[in-house]
Amino acid sequence: MTFKYKNVYINETATISGPYEKEGPLRRYFDKTYDDLYFGEKSWEKAEIKLVKDALVMIMKKSGINKSSIDLVIGGDLLNQITASTYGASGVGNSFIGVYGACSSSVLGLIIGANFIEGNFISNCACLVSSHNMSSEKQFRYPTEYGAPKPSSATFTSTGAACCMLTNEKSEVRVESATLGRIIDYEQNDPNDMGRVMAPSAIDTLVKHFEETGRDPKYYDLIVTGDLGKYGKEIVKDYLLNTYEIDLGDNYNDCGVMLYDLEKQKEIKAGGSGPVCSALVVYSYIYHLMKEKKAKKVLFLATGALFSPLLVYQKENINSICHAVSLEVV
Amino acid sequence: MKNIKYDKIADVHKAPENRIKNAFVAFFSGGVIGLLGEGFIEILCMQFHLARSDAATIMIVTFIFLASLFTSLGFFDKLVTKFRCGLLIPITGFAHSMTSSALDYKKEGPIYGIGSNMFKLAGSVIIYGIVSAWFFGMVRYIIGGIG
């Protein structure tokens, strides 16, 4: 389902990153970076809440919109009951919506916010996402000090918080259209190979977006997927070419690959993941490219794996979803 | 819905995994742990004139202590990532699994945190260790008789 927007603009973005992201190639585009993973807090969960608060303070500072003037805050993260967003955004904005789309939460938030603004119900909306490597490890995998060996297909949950302020006031970059994805089940079940799990949803949403808008990959200067990693990225390219004869060419990349230096940072394995992974790349580096007019039309697809460790142990498949948003320089 | 074509293409782009190297690293590092343990027992026997069974117990307790200490000092996980099952299969891995779980949940307090989560990984080892010990004990009893 594709929506077109006439009246939705990106006012500002704020990106806060952890130490691993700081070591990556996009360091200079982040608003604030940290050197350790606790950020002065006492637990991983509280550390993630601190990141969300930091991102909100940063977006308010950069956009000049104070906390009582923000109409709506939309937040999403990976913690149980999306608590990083709910605790972090407490006291900010006049209303709040918590969303869960796993790693697709960033675009899901943008789409919901854009629809409210396009419908003239609100005039601005802060869309935020966060994830924390350690809080995710603790919740989804093994204890953080366990250091369980991982296969090279595994992805690494990024640490950070990112916020995008959408408004109805004209700015340099606008949200042009968006495609909401559906839940895809290709009977994949390896939580250590999320690229393979999520690639089908990226393919589905991408094909749907092109069909419904009548566009092809050449229309965009840059197409980025969320967090498929280096292997998932190749699957998308190969499958689209073989099945739909869509050649993504050189203007396709994956945020999980862009966020880190995979040659040097061996612990990252196949690439970054987590809701903030794609948001950190798009809201910093890609937004910067767009403001400098080096990329005028960008399609941003955030991919998410919809599962819980419990259902994986109960032998259920891991489903995935992907939402897309098209950003254009005004 | 299964998509055979998708699986075929995804298999082409499968991440390479060097199983032989992993197995060798685990075999070698696990062997080194065994060698250290055996050397330690020998020293206890020769220098302190302990019985071999007592020396073995002291060796195990020492290794459990060291693994737990290194886990809490924060570098054992890095060694595990590097040497893999070589450090996880010996008693060091068992101690490490308990300490790391306890550390992870210390902020939730002694009852709801450490107490109820400490055996998160080690619980399976204990329960199936006991069950298999019982099973093999029975086998030995039936085949070998009481004597």
Image: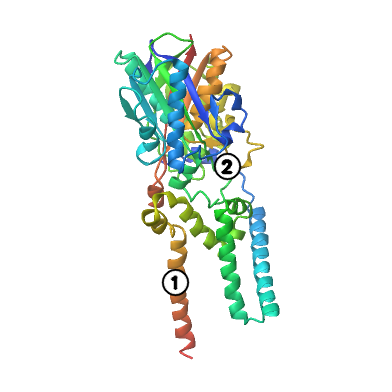
Q: Which residue is mark 2?
A: B14
- Above or below for A81 versus B102: above
Q: Position of residue B81 (x, y in %)?
A: 60, 51
Asked if residue B79 lies left or right of residue A306, the reply is right
Residue extending farthest to the left is: A121
Q: Which mark is residue A286?
A: none
Which corner quadrant of the image does residue A24 belong to?
A: top right
- In the image: residue B79, left or right of residue A204: right
Compare marks 2 and 1 and give the one earlier in the sequence.
2
Viewer can see residue B99: yes
Label 2 to label 1, Cα distance in Å?
Answer: 39 Å
Host chain of mark 2:
B
Say which amino acid is labelled 2.
Lys
* In the displayed structure image, the side of residue A135 where residue A1 appears, left or right: left
Q: Relative to A44, does residue A206 appear above or below in the rendering?
A: above
Query: In terms of depth relative to the viewer, which is nearer, B4 or A234?
Result: A234
Chain containing the residue with disc 1: B
Q: Amino acid at mark 1?
A: Ile
Q: Position of residue A106 (x, y in %)?
A: 43, 28
Examine the rendering and report whether any part of residue A210 can be seen: no
Comparing labels 2 and 1, the label whose residue is closer to the camera: 1
* Picture residue at 48% right of the left edge, 20% below the top: A13
Q: Is residue A158 above or below residue A216?
A: below
Q: Is residue B95 above or below residue B15?
A: below
Q: Residue at x 52, y 17 (%)?
A: A220
Which label is found at residue B130?
A: 1
Secondary structure at numbered mark 1: helix
